[in-house]
Amino acid sequence: MSSSFDVIVIGGGFLGLSSAYELAKQGAQVLLLEAGDIGSGTSASCSGRAQVCEGHLDPLNIQLIVDGLQKHEVLEEELGQSYDWRKIGLYLIIRTQSSWDYWQNRAATLTMQGIPTQVVDQKTLQTAEPNMNTNGLLGAVHTVEGMINPLKFSLAYASAARKYGAVIQGHSRVTNFEMNKNRVVAVQTRNERYTCDKVAVMTGAMVSETLKLAGASLPVQYTHAEAVVTEPIPPMIFNNIEISDFYETIHGKQRAVAIGVHPDLHGSIDISEAVTVTDHFHKNVSAWGITALAKELIELYPFMSKVRVVRSWGRPTSFTPDEEPIIGWMPQLENVFVATSLVETITAVPILSEWMAMMMLDKNSPTSLDQFAPSRFTL
């Protein structure tokens, strides 16, 4: 294997793997370095939702959602591997009048922008989810979103990237950047040194830790999220279920539960998420998190009290002070590109990775990503 590359991508999650694929597809010599197994981090530990209605409503975010959903319809064929893509109904349950009023306005805006969304009453919700306990609920926000298998999605991109010549390496934690003034000229792992023209840092919640190796920083924050996955059951839950006031529920609390219920293709149910504010990275789950999730789940779906949990997961979830992603070149560093903290990551990745690869190869992307630039936090 060569020890010199056009672009070294750091991070083996959705953003890193999709970018490595698009870079290699566009002719670059690419090396991707992942500290653990490929797809073993936060990306693969998620519910697999291709979200459509919970992010910002500016034109760029809407374009990423609409175009991303359209690209998913053909992406499995392009990558040459299935990742269980499908469309599924979403109901965001409404528990307060203020949330009802807010979503009435937001649903109208989303619909006008090409994402059909409506607020439905309790009776309609009960018809859609006959096994749900809707007592005390006002209704729900309804739309259609996408679902994937997160690990299959990661591995599909890794396999396709390799076919175009990208080198994808797991268990290769980056330990140092070799600098020449404000430029990274080499990336060091425990056992190897690789030279490069450019570096792409896509390590999720750990972006700031990675950038410290180059003497830079960004205000990427994170919370810790926990979830559980059940044994397969007969069809009893027919849609993705979330709460309409997710951010209000967790904001300002040391720990909180924002219940989400997601059936997969094989009958298992992913139940998320118990959220804890923390100052260190880990993948643990807690007795508090599992117990709190179980309590809220059984209140919502009483029949689930007899369903067994077969596994659980914990992961850091990154966000920025303005809740917009960070995407673009680091102003203090001549050749370091950063991407982290998307809201609709799965939805946007098929489009966004192509645009980011063009930027990294000094081409003009069809749409400007300037509003996501790191410079808004560093200048």
Image (tube, grey):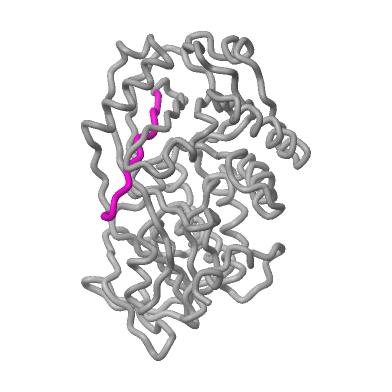
Q: Residue at x 67, y 47 (%)?
A: 57
Q: Can you give x and y, in whole percent of width and height, for residue 262 in the image?
A: 46, 27
Which contiguous range is marked in magenta?
A: 269-280
Residue 228, position in %: x, y? 32, 30
Report whether 163 appears left or right of 314.
right
Residue 67 drawn in magenta:
no
Q: Tell me if residue 258 can be seen.
A: yes
The image quarter in which residue 209 lies:
bottom left
The picture quadrant where one finds residue 207 is: bottom left
Which of 123/115 is in front? 123
Q: Main secondary structure of the magenta part?
A: strand
Q: On the rendered image, what quadrant is the N terminus found in?
A: bottom left
Nearer-the-camera pick, 53 or 377: 377
Residue under the image location 54 percent in, 13 percent down? 129
The residue nearer to you, when weighing 41 against 133, is: 133
Q: Is residue 159 visible?
A: no
Residue 11 position (above or below residue 347):
below
Residue at 45% of width from left, 53% of height from top?
319
Residue 220 locus on image (x, y percent): 42, 60
Does residue 315 lie above or below 231 as drawn? below
Q: Nearer the viewer, residue 290 or 250?
A: 250
